[in-house]
Amino acid sequence: MGINISGWRAVALSGAIGVLLMVNSARADSAEEKQKITRCAKDICSIIVSKNPKGPDLSCDLTKTWEKDEIQKGADAKSLSWGLGSARCSVKLYAKRADIAAALTSPRYTLKIEKQSIACEIGANKYPVSLTMAPELKFKNGVNVGAGLHVDNIKGAVLITGVVWTAAALERHFDIFEGDILREVNRFVQKECPKFVSGAK
């Protein structure tokens, strides 16, 4: 069973669309990558569906690859320039279980994810880019109603970082990715996770 989160493609544009969206089986370079992504999906969905604050925190070591055309489609939708080839990014994902449960069970709650480090290789030449992200997702009665990525510390080849900084600045000042985040988080929480946990296709 696959979990399709379109927000993945925005990682190559702005550093990430949100740590909680980094669970997707759309493409992995190896069976090991796909297995890790699926295992992470199972872990986060079990927390989301049970809403139980007790138990292990979410911890995943993920790698994801986007093809050039996939990235360009996302860039075009936001009137951004890309043309830099494919991208492969890795993140050691961590989030506190109790915080996720509280976000889904409290009348109002701001889920603050600790700063995550993301490392990417861009294009055929594998230009390295690194950045950090500390997303905040605002919930009201279990529904995601506000989001911010807080992308920072972007380092790497000037050609690449310029594009990422531009996307990050647009997100910070104009919330250009917020609508995507809200839509995908709510779909993930309300529709994808219950199906994934139950084993439905």
Image (cartoon, helix red, strand yellow):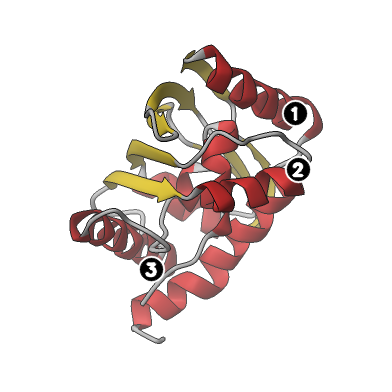
Residue ID at (78%, 25%)? 173
Name which residue type carries label 3: Ser
Question: In the displayed structure, would residue 151 be above or below residue 124?
Answer: above
Q: Earlier in the sequence, mark 1 or mark 3?
A: 3
* Viewer-proximal residue among 107 and 5: 5
Location of residue 118 in the rendering, given as x and y in whole percent from the top left corner: 40, 30
Instruction: Give the residue type that dot 1 points to.
Output: Leu
Q: Quadrant of residue 147?
A: top right
- How crowded pointer 3 is (Cα within 10 Å; few <14, some 14-19, many 20+) is rated as few
Using a 10 Å C-alpha cutoff, classify the residue at mark 2 as few (fewer than 14 neighbours), some (14 to 19) or many (20 or more). some
Which residue in the structure is indicated by mark 1? 170
**Residue corresponding to mark 3:** 50
- Image quadrant occupied by the C terminus: bottom left
Which label sits in the foreground, 2 or 1?
2
Q: Residue at x 38, y 68 (%)?
A: 50
Q: Secondary structure at mark 1?
A: helix
Determine the secondary structure under disc 2. loop
Q: Work out how far the residue at label 2 is from the one at label 1, CA to CA, in angstroms.
A: 10 Å
Residue 144 placed where, x, y %? Answer: 65, 54
- What residue would you read off at disc 2? 78
Seen from the viewer's position, the closer of residues 5 and 73 is: 73
